[in-house]
Amino acid sequence: MKKIVSLLCLLLAVFAWAGVSLALDALEVQALRPKAKLSFQALEEGKLLVSVQDKDGEAILGLRKEDFSIKQGVKTAKILSVEDVQEQRNIGLNIVLVVDNSYSMEQRKAVEPLLAALNSFLGLVRPIDNVHVVTFVDPGTKQPRVSTRTFQGNEVSALGQFLRGSFFPATTDGTYLYDSMQKGLEIIGQMPADSQKFMLVFSDGEDINSVVKGEEVALAAKGVKNFSAYAVDYMDKPGLDVFLTAFAQGHGGMIRKANSANDFLPILKKFSTTIFHRYVVTYRFLNPPAGTLASAPGVVNIEEVTMVDSSPLLNHIYFDTGKSRIPDRYVALATPEEVGAFAEEKLTGTMEKYHQVLNVIGKRLLANPEARITLVGCNSNTGVEKGKIALAKSRAEAVAAYLKSVWGIDPSRMEIKARNLPAVPSSSRVPEGIVENQRVEILSTYPAILDTIKSTYMLEQADTKEIRISPSVQAEVEIDYWQLRLLSADKVLATREGAGTPPTEVAFALETLGGAHTIAMLGKVSADLEVKDKEGNVFSTAGSPIVINFIRREERIAQKTGNKVMEKYGLILFDFDRTELKDRNQVIVNRVLARVAELKSVTMNIAGHTDSIGTEKYNIDLSERRAKAVYDTTLQTGIAAATQINHVGNGPNNPPYDNSLPEGRSLNRTVIITLQYME
């Protein structure tokens, strides 16, 4: 059982040392030994004098650093050293011996055994210790009355000589125990309050002749700080003396009964072990966390690029399970003004263009009155949609209704068909594939209706995809919590937090921060870190600012350094698990090759992608085959040299679109061709 002793507990505990410094009220000292009783005295900042006893009051010897624990509230101290007091040369003990040298000691032939036992006890006294001896003396006729004699020293021979002289040539006729104890307390009262003081009383009989009463002795001892009392009861009566028992035990010490002179030596050896074998424990409270924060890159270069974007038109409208209502993520125009202002060339980004696909097709049908479309409603043919042809048809009718009501398309130009699974379905073995089959396919033999969606716009392009913050924290106490913030001036851009030690690197993707367009306007970005350990210590630090270098198109033109142009072509999407370049895919590749023939010093990047369905290894291989099909076709034309072309298969990694949506997965089954050159 472990016993934690604080100052408040020490004032009430059996082995408490009274008067421990009030500055240590919250200090808890723990001896990690079963049933150990511990008391302590503050010597100075970071140093304690500690006594540890077992259940019988015996000093526990041989304790080491790992046997102690010191806390103050939630703070834990590191134990630096533990030394026995006997090994210390700078901490002295104050000991007062009160020795009964009355005539009965001579009668009981106990003088020599007592002197031998006291000499053994005094043999442990060091030069730094301070010892006072108080013995009886029969008062004479002098006034005032004197019943005690004292001697102070730290030389064993001188102390022993004084004790022997107290018995020879003669002992006292009277017994002046209370007078002597009172005198000892007066001596103790003159000692420094923060020093440890001990009184050892040897009594051969009950007090008979003292002027001082026992109550006065008890009152004089009350409130004495850092004071412990020990007593040897050699009175010729059974049991322990009531007064001495209360005095010793009430002041953190012990009393033992000597039934014969042979008991003196073992009793005093036991007392000496307890008094002299104390520990000086040095400690320090653990340091709060410290550390640094590094940022990379130190500079983010962002430049305006002219983006010529040719996005594929995904001719599928996806529906929720069991529903025929067009989902809200598809943009529905509500007023004639919105319809009149709609222009597909103003759309930016493939996903934005896709969610406007019904409006793109509506506008194109208006512009090409001879064109017709076929709307093929499909269901997943599983679960609640199993065999629901009517559901498939109502989905196609919902699309037709929107084109008619918003764009005024004559129903005679829209043929409605219904089937269970699509003609080229996605896998029904996984939930993602099932949802993709819940769709309306928009088909047309008129090329302009399903052609790619082209737009030209300015795009901010950064030379990195992420900002990386690397915390380095050193802590002597376990980290409880950390928080990392990315800032622009006083605005918090992003926050990461967690329990335990912060990771060695935290990455913030530019896309999650609003993209390069948002970052370009900030000028600088900085990070700060706050950690809290399990002792409540809080540490915070900030990293060096990351400079945002924004290169505007106008600046390039003014400097005549040329404007960077990127042309991005997304192939018409591959069917699920397919790699063939056919139909519209081949048309787009031919357009790219014609464009390459017009340009000088152009680089061509071909990136294959897949959805997230299936294993990563298989999908990477599939995306590589898709990219290589385009690469081989390009090389065969001889328009571009191999050194101008890079091709890679990303598989499901770094997906250009959101794989959590069916349209995102469909758009990810693509090869994106990017041409880059200086205008």
Image (tube, rainbow, N blue to C red):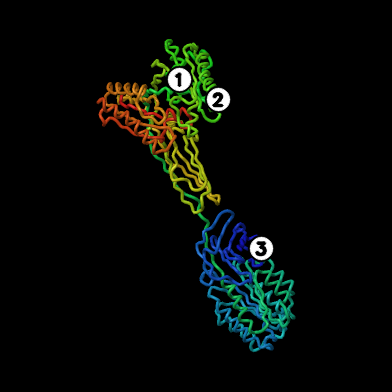
> Counting other residues with Cα less than 10 Å from the Cα at mark 3, is it few (<14), some (14-19), or many (20 or more)?
some
> Counting other residues with Cα less than 10 Å from the Cα at mark 2, is it few (<14), some (14-19), or many (20 or more)?
some
Question: Vertical placement of 128 versus 593: above or below?
Answer: below
SS class of the residue under badge 1? Answer: strand
Percent x, y for residue 550? 38, 30
340 or 618: nearer the viewer: 618
SS class of the residue under badge 2? Answer: loop
Residue pointed to by mark 2: 323
Residue 242: quarter of image = bottom right
Q: Is residue 250 visible?
A: yes
Residue pointed to by mark 3: 11
- Image quarter where the N terminus lies is bottom right
Q: Earlier in the sequence, mark 3 or mark 1?
A: 3
The residue lying at 62 percent from left, 75 percent from top is 96
- Image quarter where the C terminus lies is top left
Percent x, y for residue 516? 42, 30
Q: Earlier in the sequence, mark 3 or mark 2?
A: 3
- Residue type at the position of mark 2: Lys
Residues at marks 3 and 2, CA–CA distance in whole angstroms: 77 Å
Q: Is residue 593 left or right of residue 203?
A: left
Question: Vertical placement of 70 versus 463: above or below?
Answer: below
Percent x, y for residue 677? 31, 26
Residue pointed to by mark 1: 442
Q: Earlier in the sequence, mark 2 or mark 1?
A: 2
